Structure formats: C-alpha cells, structure tokens
Amino acid sequence: MKVLKTFNKASQILTIVAAVAALVFFFFGFASVTADGVQHMLTGAEMSFKGTEEVAGEAVKMARSADVLFCFCLTAIGVIFSALTFKAKGMRYASPFVNLAAGIYMLVIACSKPVYFVDLRPLVGVDYSTLTYEFGVWGITIALLVAAVLGIAHLLLDDYIFVNESKSAKYTIPKRVIRFFKDYKSETKKIVWPTLRMVVKNTLIVFAICAIFGVFIWALDFGLSKLLDLLFNL
C-alpha cells in the first residue's frame, strides 16, 4: 500500500508538470510562414492574443485564432484543476477530463492543414509561399495527453487506496461502472415492449389529435385575422 501511495502522489505531481509543460509550449514555435522570402515564427500565444510580426518593414498585427485560443484557455484551466487536486478531491475527475479534451482538440489541429487554423488575412497583399506547423504543436498535444493519462492514473489509484482503507465498504470506480451496466441490463429485461397493433393504434391516435388541433388553430387564426381586417376597415 505504501508503494501505491508513492505512485499515487508521483502521478499527481507529474500531472501538474505535464499540464504546465503544455502551457509553456504555447510560447514556443507553433507555426511558421514565409512572407516575401522571410520566415516568420508564430507562437501559440501570439496566435491566441494577436501578436505582432514585422513584415516588409511594417508591423503587422496577426489575427487571433479562435481554435488556438480555445485550446490555450482549456490548457490553463487544466493546470488550475490539476493544482487544485491537492486541496479538493472532486478535481480528480475534472482535471483529466479537461486535459483530455484539450489534448484531443490539439491533436485535431496538429493532424489538419495549418491553413485551417492559422489566420493569414492580415497578410493580404504580401506574398507568402509556405505555411507549416512547428514542434510546439506536437509538444502541446503530447504534454496534454500525458497529463490526461497521468490524471486518470491518479484518479484510479487514489480511489483504489480509499476503498482499500475503508475495508472494501465501497466499490472502486471500475467495479462501480461494471455494476452500473449490469443493473442497466437487468432493468432493460423488465421493459414490456408494445405489440405492433398497439404501436399502429397509438400512432393513429397521435396523428388524429395533431390533425384536430391543427385544424382548430388554423380556424382560430383565420377567424382572428378576418376580425382584425374588419376592425381596420372600420
């Protein structure tokens, strides 16, 4: 049990380290664009908060990438949630979920063409030839996915230690999940499915009621519109 507690604490600390590393990678090269023969390196932070680049001797304010900004905010929230696991045990569930969501989003960005996520509209009139991702994209993605895996490991280890110390008075998370599906399966067996005749009968009743109310509403609308026309004419 002492070894498990050591691994549990190590996974908790490493989760924060990985989440912070992902946030730091936003300040490294995210994408590079060659404009007028000069290569410009854009960081994830610049793409999130409209950084400025000097192009053709002029300072050009780059456009904000909503997707990169969203991932930056998710990563920052993941860092906060990971740190709060030391104070609030409920954050054990939120931390890996946020890190996993940010990691999957970043993976989608990394596997897509840069032109879909790097807004080059401020470079109108500038001849740009290449647009590629830099190592920062994969650094963020890997760090976030590692943080999510470590967060899940901490959650499962912490839960297992808690259940063991309670002398198996409670179930671990995997056992609770298995029990839920077993209960769900047993409850579905109690469902009494209607016969084909009942389905047809109830469907016809619903159609009939809808038709009656439709005609009633149409007649009411038609009558009120005629009444308003009459009043306006007077």
Image (tube, rainbow, N blue to C red):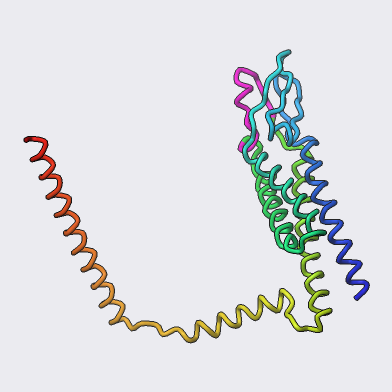
- Which residue is outermost to the top? 57
Name the quadrant of the C terminus. Answer: top left
Q: Is residue 36 left or right of residue 197?
A: right
Instruction: Say above or below: 34 vs 187.
Output: above
Q: Is residue 45 left or right of residue 125?
A: right
Q: Is residue 123 magenta?
A: yes
Instruction: Say above or below: 170 vs 143.
Output: below
Q: Residue at x 77, y 39 (%)?
A: 26
Q: Find the magenta span and give its range.
A: 116-130
* Whole-percent x, y for residue 54 in the image: 74, 19
Q: Residue at x 70, y 22 (%)?
A: 35
Name the quadrant of the N terminus. Answer: bottom right
Q: Residue at x 67, y 53 (%)?
A: 101
Q: Residue at x 78, y 43 (%)?
A: 23
* Whole-percent x, y for residue 47 in the image: 69, 33
Instruction: Say above or below: 186 vs 216.
Output: below
Report the front residue among 149 and 231: 231
Q: Is residue 34 magenta?
A: no
* Whole-percent x, y for residue 2 in the image: 93, 73
